Amino acid sequence: MLAGPLHGLRVAFVALEAFPNAKGSGTRIGQMTRALADAGAEVTVLSLPGRTDEAHPRVRLRPVPIAEGNYLARALAFRDAVARELRALRPDVVHFRGPFEGQAAAAYAEDTKARAVFEVNGLPSVELRYHYPRFAEDPSLEGRLRTLEAKLLGAADLVLTQSETTRDFLRHRGLRGEARVIHNGAKLIAPSAGAQDAALYTGSLTPWQGLPELLMALRRARREGGEAIRLKVVGPAKKRWRRQIARAAKRLKVEDGLELVSAIPRDELASLVAQAPFCVAPLRRDLRNDVQGCNPIKLYEYMAAGRAVLATDLRCVREIVTHDETGWLVRPNPKALAEGLLRLGGDPALRERLGEAARRTIEEGGTWAHRRAELVEAYEALLARA
């Protein structure tokens, strides 16, 4: 077997989260580490303990157990543990996804002349307010995080991100050099003839996903002639978010049109996507989505299965979906979403046209194989620099 282009390169891939996991972040980490390992690199993942049955056979997992329950205490303890692990591993490249582990990575890289790769999918100075509402009440903490994030953007030898929207946001936040965009992707899935009768949403129930607006749209659509429209929501959620969605459905009197399903194995989820009449991504227009940017894996997975997509018309979404060509984009409000539900729900020919074009788009340039090749190319360019 020929040696890969990264043969012998020692890479520490560091992430302040459990890995492997069933979330979109877990999918991306799995694909990125697989890309490096398949190219010949010796990859070790430093993360919080995750599901050990899902690791790539050539990727070494080195879980870092942290006992602290408080987020900041956990992050700082992880940072300190990573610093110790890096000294033991002696990697040539440290690939990190956040500022806390990034502090340890940057310090190690400066001391040893190793390369530092900062992969930005979301910054804590933006994200934490959604997970911990009290964070927004402490502007000094946000300021300290922003300063740290900007410092690491300047210290990294290579900055990666998942969308053009995020790249432009990073420039606003202090990035002086270039950031290389590697979008998310999907594995192609054959559409199923035995279609379900409910429009499908997959993913978390976090506030920025726009589920409350989608439920309001469902009520409106059912009142305006779409009595048969039903919605299936599948994905993990904190208990409080699931309760909020259930209460909203009851208040809006759409319980009979809504099915809430907890997280299921990925192969079962892929089957559900392939059978759905169409799929939905009702992202809110807010700081996280429309300013920082994101690159929802669900959109790629919907398209890879040949499903028509109803999504809100945000810049980050337009990087993936083209209106009336590979999906149907609407303004991010309940009225427009209701119109989209009625349009796609009542037009099988439109759904078929959009779904076929969407699948072609992924097949031609949006699979995980394409993304893995892009990452290896980015690493080769990094290593070629003097």
Image (cartoon, helix red, strand yellow):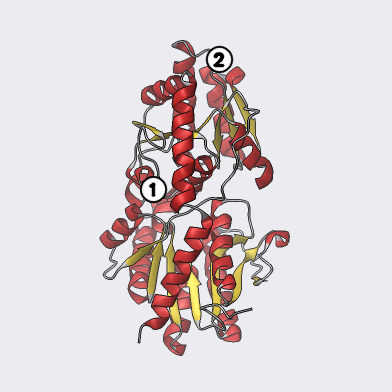
The answer to whether 159 is drawn above or below residue 238 in the figure is below
**Residue found 59% across the figure and 44% down from its top:** 189
Mark 1: give few (<14), some (14-19) or many (20+) Cα within 10 Å.
some
In the rendered image, which quarter is residue 27 located in? bottom right
Residue 89 in the figure: left or right of residue 322: right
Q: Residue at x 45, y 31 (%)?
A: 353
Q: Residues within 10 Å of mark 2 (few under 14, many from 20)?
A: few
Number of numbered discs overlaid on the protein picture: 2
Which residue does the numbered mark 2 point to in the structure image?
228
The residue tagged 1 is 288
- Local SS, label 1: helix
Quarter of the view holding residue 149: bottom left
Q: Give the label, 1 or 2, closer to the camera.
A: 2
Label drawn at residue 335? none
Query: Secondary structure beneath disc 2?
Result: loop
* Nearer to us in this view, 278 or 98: 278
Relative height, residue 200 to residue 100 (above, below): above
Q: Amino acid at mark 1?
A: Arg
- The percent position of residue 257, horizontal first and vertical second, equals 58, 20
Q: CA distance from mark 1 to mark 2?
A: 33 Å
Q: Residue at x 44, y 53 (%)?
A: 365
Foreground pick, 124 / 378 = 378
Can you name the residue that lies furthest to the bottom here? 112
Provide residue 153's location: percent of width, then percent of height.
Answer: 35, 70
Q: What amino acid is found at the position of numbered circle 2 in the picture?
A: Ala
Q: Position of residue 246 (x, y in %)?
A: 59, 28
Q: Is residue 26 left or right of residue 364?
A: right
Check the picture and name the quadrant holding the N terminus. bottom right
Residue 327 visible somewhere in the drawing: yes
Q: Name the residue at 60% across, 70% down.
A: 45
Label 1 vs 2, first from the N-terminus: 2
Residue 296 visible to the viewer? no
